[in-house]
Image (cartoon, grey):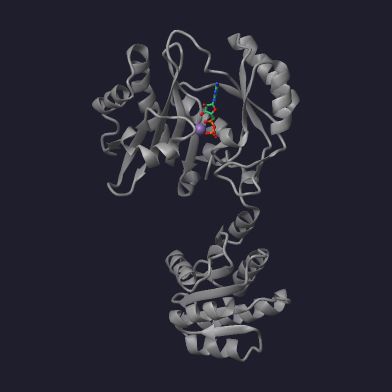
Amino acid sequence: MNLHEFQGKQILESYGATIQKGILAYNNKEALEAAKKIKQETGTSFFVVKAQVHAGGRGKGGGIKLAKSFEEVDSFSSSIIGMNLVTPQTSKEGKKVNKVLVCQDVYEPGEFEIREFYFSILLDRKTSKNVIVYSTEGGMDIEEVAEKTPELIFKEIINPDTGVLSFQARKIAFNLGLKGVAFKEMLKFVNSAYNAYLGSDSSLVEINPLIQNSSNNILAVDCKFVIDDNSIYRNTEIGLMRDKSEENPDELEAAEFGLNYVKLDGNVGCVVNGAGLAMATMDLIKQAGGNPANFLDVGGTADANRVEQAFRIILKDNNVKCILVNIFGGIVRCDRVAQGIVDAYNKIGEINIPIIVRLQGTNAEIAKDIIDSSGLQVHSVTLFKDAALKVQELLS
Ligand code: GDP
Ligand code: MN
């Protein structure tokens, strides 16, 4: 589960990190009030209006605007709220913006040079440990830095048994070239961010940019949290931060039926039981010259109802040219699934695209008979290889 910037910042702050403060607003009137309140508290007349959507690269897409007056806060929030924000991380259609975070501009010049750092914590699968990734080259083009000058990106592996050791935090502050107050604040920040990462059961906490401001303080300007879905049951407060309006409606509907569905851009829909087999099926489709339209794991109980829901969700996608059902009958009996497919097909009616069904395992023979004698436009195959050939044939 992804969090919004404002929610991530809330968590970071609760663990003692300093953040660029902001107030959430759902319309330009609220944005204006927010700016007035920020002026009262801080004295500043410079603000940033930041679109709150589950996608990065907002700056590049016009979702982050510097406002030098209340009038500008008003006009920028009016134009950002309601817009379809297209960024390098969204689809071509973009994401509808429902709310903005009005923040104090924290880049006001002063005694010290303002510097933007990159800072993230994630799980390193190679070492099975957490890793802090950081760089002096923070800001909007970190992807380019990673590609062209990877030597400017540092990594610090953290042993989960010990947590961040003090020499590690000092090394990070030193490599970022910090001195005086900023050096000390960075030690505190590293610990706060690491505790926030652990405490929220995140798989990623990314702060880009983390800045050294003109008073030599360290503060988080942006913030992204990816929470491990399997932990939400024990983090009730974080669970409440879920913003369903940011999620794909078909994926949400699928989840209600206990289907693990992820929408993709291809032309072959797939209905599979088991995540591993689903991945293998997607590879198979690719090798056969197609592209998977989705990942879909129907789980252990591939009954008629689930198969029907799976078909319905996949059929909403106009790109889908055929559907490949690939079920291994281990726990579930193939003949029951076959009957489920026939029932679902009849119930939905008007399925105008071919369906390839591969049922393998318990009662596979009986299942094939059920499909073959159903009179429906369903092609049954037994071997994985034949499924691939059939996909190839139907797409050509
Ligand atoms: P992202 O584009 O989605 O990653 O959104 P960010 O929150 O990182 O904002 C994008 C960029 O806006 C940052 O890299 C900063 O350079 C800039 N920015 C954010 N806050 C401020 C601010 O208070 N003042 C100024 N001058 N720039 C800011
Ligand atoms: Mn950012």
Query: Residue 386, image x and y in percent?
Result: 47, 83
Left or right: residue 247 compared with residue 236: right
Quarter of the image where one finds residue 81 = top right
Of 268 and 362, nearer the camera is 268
The residue at 62%/68% (across/down) is: 320
> Which residue extends farthest front?
148
Quarter of the image where one finds residue 143 = top left
Quarter of the image where one finds residue 72 = top right
Is 355 placed above or below 256 here? below
Is 187 placed above or below 223 here? above
The residue at 36%/27% (across/down) is: 190
Left or right: residue 136 compared with residue 51: left
Left or right: residue 349 compared with residue 106: right
Q: Is residue 333 visible?
A: no
Of 264 and 238, nearer the camera is 264
Q: Quadrant of the C terminus?
A: bottom right
Locate ligand 1 by image quadrant. top right
Of 204 and 57, nearer the camera is 57
The residue at 58%/79% (across/down) is: 394
Is 272 placed above or below 243 here? below
Query: Residue 371, image x and y in percent?
Result: 59, 86
Q: Is residue 292 visible?
A: yes
